[in-house]
Every structure is written in structure tokens, then in C-alpha cells.
Amino acid sequence: MQSSEIRKKFLEFFEARGHTVIAASSLVPEGDNTTLFTGSGMQPLLKYLLGEPHPVGRRLVNSQKSFRTEDIEEVGDNRHDTFFEMLGNWSLGEYFKEEQLSWIFEFLTSVVGLDPQRMYVTVFAGDKENNIPRDDESVAIWQRLFKEKGMDAKAVEFVTEERGAELGMQGGRIFYYQAKNWWSRAGQPAKMPAREPGGPDSEMFYEFSNIEHDLKFGRYCHPNCDCGRFVEIGNSVFMEYKKNEDGTFSKLSQRNVDFGGGLERIVAASNDNPNIFTIDVFAPLVARIRAGGGTSNPRSEQIVADHVRASVFLIGDGVAPSNKDRGYILRRLIRRAVTHGHYLIGLPMGFLSTLIDTVIMSYEDAYPDLKRDREMIREVFEKEQVAFERTYTNGIKEFEKVLAKGEMISGV
Ligand code: SER
């Protein structure tokens, strides 16, 4: 399926279940200096998750532009990107686990058409230290949902990823983990600042069964293994806790649902192809990069595709290259794209900015502002690209002169 189709169907599915579509926020968080970028759909909704009434109601849905740098070293493999679209639905103190898990399973299996036999889910194993119970309620719901598809869903308790790698799948369909199934913006309970909301979550994985487990990641494969056989496609957070000033946890005034699903990964799963860079929004970009360079280097091609796409969206939201904060991250993306593009794939100097139109073409219906701001985006990108290409070329020339004189050898 195409990205635009899945995005549209997701919004329609939740609209039909009483949700209001809210506009995506900027990648530059508004009135929130806790993070440099909007990294999830819940971030702009924080105060509503904490109890303030939202102007349009208690059931919301959208597709949120998101940017995360945590996985930047992994970008270039087949499933990580810096910029991505997060499909999100929220219950602000209304429905809870029963409706959420039933709906999202229905969406993924009946609307997107994913085979339930290829889906595995994880749930929270509990946290004794913070007095947060194991999520047996979600397990019972999942068992019923799989049963309705004619499947027995055995629950297996791993708690840690190490245990998962030691034991393997055990014929399970539902797996308990602890740290992996707790979600807050800050991560684990110990890392959360006072007043931060969080909660247990239930993640869904799609199994790309043609990917063989890689022993480098442990003896056996399991849903949270990093070999790429299981890819997380969605996460329902049951956000009902907050951290207190004294470090303990108590219930929020309302029980929330915060669902986030990676659009690119869901599209890849719908095509049964584990590589997100083959989906419709990436394919033309990767094809142009491949045709433009002289050397085949899939990892670098994917890095260039990711970084150029992310730069277009960041510049579109007003970020300009600089030496600090957001501007510095953008600068790094453009420079890294130039380095991989020119030096590892052989793209000609000046080529990268010609990819901007290719990115915008894939997104002009969903994000018309990109089309409107095309010239501004090109100008900002090109200025940084040209300056860096010049610096790099001069650096290489100096290096070659030194090499020619043999100074490198004697200087070591
Ligand atoms: N906030 C959760 C996440 O980012 C679910 O949307 O995964």
C-alpha cells in the first residue's frame, strides 16, 4: 500500500470511532523547551494528558511529523530513520485498553491487511520497586483478539531482552518485558523527572519471516531482538501514572491512551518488504541517488535519502543550519549527506539539492506548505551544501599535497 492511503485510512478509521483529526504540530516544539524537536505525537498534547481539557474533545487522531536523533547511527540499515511520520490516536481520560487494543488490531489486520500470524505483541512485566503491577489485563484482551482470528496466543514472561535471547520464542505470541514496555518521554521510571507522565505500553511487531536471525544479537530471536526479523510497528501507551516529587508513582487524574505507529514501517509491512527505503515516499528518491552516483553503496544511499528528506522537513519548519542546538543537528545532517553522497557514492558536487523536488513531490498533497516554501527550502539547503562542499574539497587538496610530500609518513 501507499503511504498516503494508509495515512488517510488511519484518520478515517478513528474518525468513524468518534475521534477528531487534529493538525500536525511543527517539528520545532512550541512553548516546550524540554526537547529540541517534536519526537512523538503525544509531545504537543502533554498538558491535555495531564488533565487540562482539550478544545476539540477527548478522542484525537493525527499523523505527526517527528524527528529523533537517538537512532542516527542506525540510519542506513533497512528500518531506521531520523524523520518519520507517527500515526497517533489518543483517549484523554476516556476509553482504555479494551477499545484501544481491539481497534488497533482491527485497523492493522482488516484495514491494512496484515496477516495476524505475522503479528506478535509485548506487554508490561510489572515493576515491583515502583509498585506498578504486571499488565495481565492487556494479555487477556490480546488472547481474545487472537482467538477471534482462530489463533491460540500463549503468553511468555521474559522481563529482559537477555532472557528473550536465552529462551527464544517458546511458541509464544504475547511476551512480557519490563523496561521495553514502559514509556515516558524521559524513558525508564528512574530517569523521569517529577510530574512527568508515563505508563506501561503494549507494542506490536510484524515478523519479516524471510529475515534469518543473526547470532550476533544473541542465541535466539525474540520480538525485541535487534536482528530485524521483528519490527515494531505500533505502540499503545496506557498513560495513567505520574512521578511524584518524592520519586514514587501515583495515578494521574485520568487514564489516557497514547498510540503511536510508524507510518513508514506500517507501509513496509503492508508490502511485506522489511526495507522502509523501498516504500513509495522513498523509492523515487533512492532511485535518483542510485542513478546519480557511480558506486553502489546501499547504506550510504539510504543515509542520503533519510538526511535529505529530514532536512527538507526541518527547513520547512523554520530550522536553519547553525552551530548550536537544532541548527547544529540540521548542519550535521546536510554535511553527513554530502560526505556519504559525494565521497562514498560518487554523486557530483551540487547534486543533493536537486533531490529536494523529489522529496516535495512525494509529500505535496499531505504537506502543501513544503510546495509553497520550495524556494526557501532550496536556498537554505544549497547554501550549507555549497559551503561544506568547498571546505571539504579544500581539505582534501591539502591532504593530497601533504601525502605527495610524504609528510604523513614521517609525521606519524
Ligand atoms: N508516545 C509513544 C511513542 O512515542 C506512543 O505514541 O512510542
Image (spheres, rainbow, N blue to C red):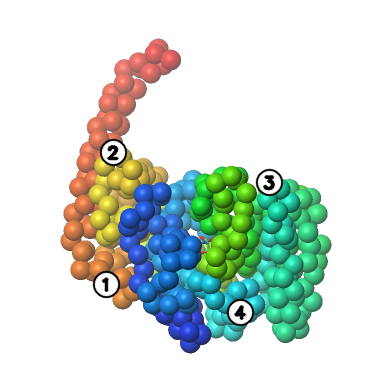
Whether label 4 touches label 2, CB < 8 Å: no
Point out which mark residue 99 bears: 4
Classify mark 1: helix, strand or loop.
helix
Cα separation between marks 4 and 2: 47 Å
Give the left or right position of residue 117, taking residue 285 as reference. Answer: right
Instruction: Give the residue drawn at x 38%, y 18%.
Output: 408
Cα separation between marks 1 and 3: 44 Å
Cα separation between marks 3 and 4: 39 Å
Instruction: Give the residue drawn at x 31%, y 17%.
Output: 405
Give the left or right position of residue 55, taking residue 130 as reference. Answer: left
Point out which mark residue 323 bears: 2
Whether label 3 touches label 4, CB < 8 Å: no
Classify mark 2: helix, strand or loop.
loop
Q: Where does the image place residue 162, in percent across and percent down from the top left?
A: 73, 48
Identified by mark 1, the residue type is: Pro
CB at disc 4 and ligand 1 closer than 8 Å:
no
Q: Where does the image place residue 137, in percent across and percent down from the top left?
A: 72, 70
Q: Residues within 10 Å of mark 2 (few under 14, many from 20)?
A: few
Q: Nearer the viewer, mark 1 or mark 3?
A: 1
Position above or below: 357 against 401 = below
Identified by mark 4, the residue type is: Glu
Position above or below: 22 against 67 = below
Cα separation between marks 2 and 3: 38 Å
Cα separation between marks 1 and 4: 33 Å
